[in-house]
Image (cartoon, helix red, strand yellow):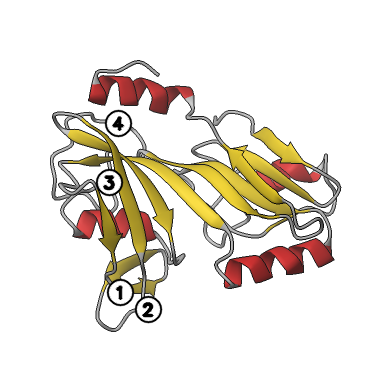
Amino acid sequence: MSAAPTILHEDPFLVIACKPSGLLSVPTPGATGRTLEGELASRYPRIAAVHRLDREVSGAMLFARDPSTRTALEQLFRERAVRKLYWALALMGPKKDEGAISFPILESGASARVSAAGKPARTLFRVLARGLAANEVEIELVTGRYNQIRLHFAHSGWPLVGDRKYGKFREDPFRFPRVALHAWKLAFAHPRTGKPLQVLAPLPGELAELRERALGVGP
């Protein structure tokens, strides 16, 4: 069973919670189990998610507490005015310290693939530290296609540690039971006050231990 979600920020209009790996974001057709939205509903009765994370992925998720705030937050996402930064461990790359990946992505049900027939997709990355088999990377999504980070990194030849969906072609020496991807920062202007809001979701214990093993450093 996944751990209980942690509240990272709350005010009268919105909530930011840290989703544990293994917990669904919202009810999804064909998937069973608890959801983060459901876990929060007893405490925040009108709560509604404004974006999602994959079931395996942990980290910060943004929720509205009323319909008008939800509309305002969804508009910020459409305008790409919400910065979404992720932490990841990528096998054997990237070689450059920073860069962008821009392969178009064609979404198909519960999967996706790089295809010229797909929609434009752009992922920015910055290498934070390098290990013998994996590099620690901070990633920023410019677009938000399904499985975008996992697919972009696998297609580039640097699948994420633990990614059994898109990284099957590369031997993973860590044998980690989940994808090493964590939504660790959200930053945007609060839709009601206009003030800058930035929230950090610390790495969960299993990712902190993996990081130490992969890079030979403490937390």
In primary-sequence order, the first of circles 4 and 1 is: 1
Tell me the SS state at disc 2: loop
- Label 3: how many Cα within 10 Å (few below 14, some 14–19, many 20+): some
Residue at disc 4, secondary structure: loop
Q: Please name the amino acid that badge 3 sits on.
A: Arg
Query: Of the residues shown, which amino acid type is indicated by label 1?
Result: Pro
Q: CA distance from mark 4 to mark 1?
A: 28 Å
Say which label, 2 or 4, has the lower sequence index. 2
**Cα distance between the residues tagged 2 and 3:** 24 Å
Mark 3 element type: loop
Given this view, does label 4 or label 1 mark the residue nearer the observer?
1
Q: Is residue 60 above or below residue 81?
A: above
- In the picture of the structure, the residue carrying the numbered disc 1 is 104
Given residues 169 and 136, the one toward you in this image is 136
Give the residue type at disc 2.
Lys
Quadrant containing the N terminus in the rendered view: top right
Residue topped by disc 3? 164
